[in-house]
Amino acid sequence: MSPLQTAHDAKRTSAEGRRNARRRTAGFAGKCLLVSREDAFIEGMQRAASGAGWDCASSDDPRDSLRRAFLHCFGLAIVDIAPTLHRQLLSDLFRILNGASGGLVIAYDRRADPETELWARQNGAWLYVPGVADWDSLSTACAEARRLHERKSKQDTLGASV
């Protein structure tokens, strides 16, 4: 085998390794980020998401959730968008979750305000949940998000739609 062919094989193998590493990072991420300032709400979200098979991490601070989104790949985030002064941080969080890992965002709004719904959808929320928490329906949404990520993972692996 010629040195040129060996160098070519090494380069090809290295590129395949980088592609596979990227797929692991950007593919199905079984982690779910829960963002709320209320412990009872986080507990309810955690029951709903873990029941659908998600590995949950929680944050009660928008800045902390933004940092976590930079450091980890989350396939799903459930964000309590209660009246807050941190709209810009939450907007950045939505964009990071949607862009980097293809994560889905469920925006939960206890007030069911039409302006807040518009804001959430404009910032990339996959699902907007208005009103009082119904953990069963949220659990169903979490299960659907998991199925979507599994399908996307198969599509990325095979290179074609499944």
Image (cartoon, grey):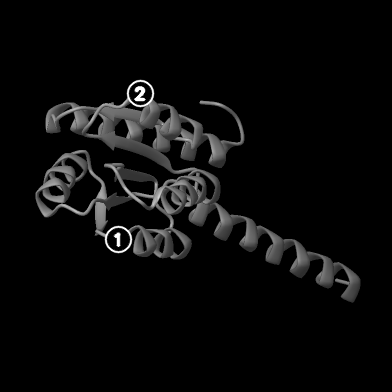
Please tell me whether residue 87 is drawn above or below residue 152 in the rendered image: below
The residue sitting at 49% across, 37% down in the picture is 123
Q: Is residue 119 left or right of residue 30?
A: right
The residue sitting at 50% across, 51% down in the picture is 96
State the image coordinates of residue 136 (x, y, percent, origin top left). Answer: 13, 29
Distance Cα–Cα, label 2 vs label 1: 24 Å
State the image coordinates of residue 70 (x, y, percent, origin top left). Answer: 47, 62
Q: Is residue 10 left or right of residue 140?
A: right
Residue at the left extreme, as displayed: 40
- 3 or 133: which is nearer to us? 133
- 50 or 11: which is nearer to us? 50
Q: Earlier in the sequence, mark 2 or mark 1?
A: 1
Q: Quadrant of the N terminus?
A: bottom right
The residue sitting at 46% across, 50% down in the picture is 88
In terms of secondary structure, where does tag 1 sit? loop
Residue at the top extreme, as displayed: 114
State the image coordinates of residue 72 (x, y, percent, origin top left). Answer: 42, 61
Residue type pointed to by label 2? Pro
State the image coordinates of residue 152 (x, y, percent, origin top left). Answer: 48, 35
User: How would you rate the neighbour count of disc 1 (Cα within 10 Å): few for under 14, some for 14-19, many for 20 or more?
Assistant: few
Residue type pointed to by label 1? Asp
Please tell me whether residue 133 is drawn above or below residue 20 in the rendered image: above
- 26 or 14: which is nearer to us? 26
Quadrant assignment, res 60: bottom left
**For mark 2, what is the residue?**
114
The residue sitting at 83% across, 66% down in the picture is 8
Count the numbered circles shown: 2
In terms of secondary structure, where does tag 2 sit? helix
**For mark 1, what is the residue?**
61
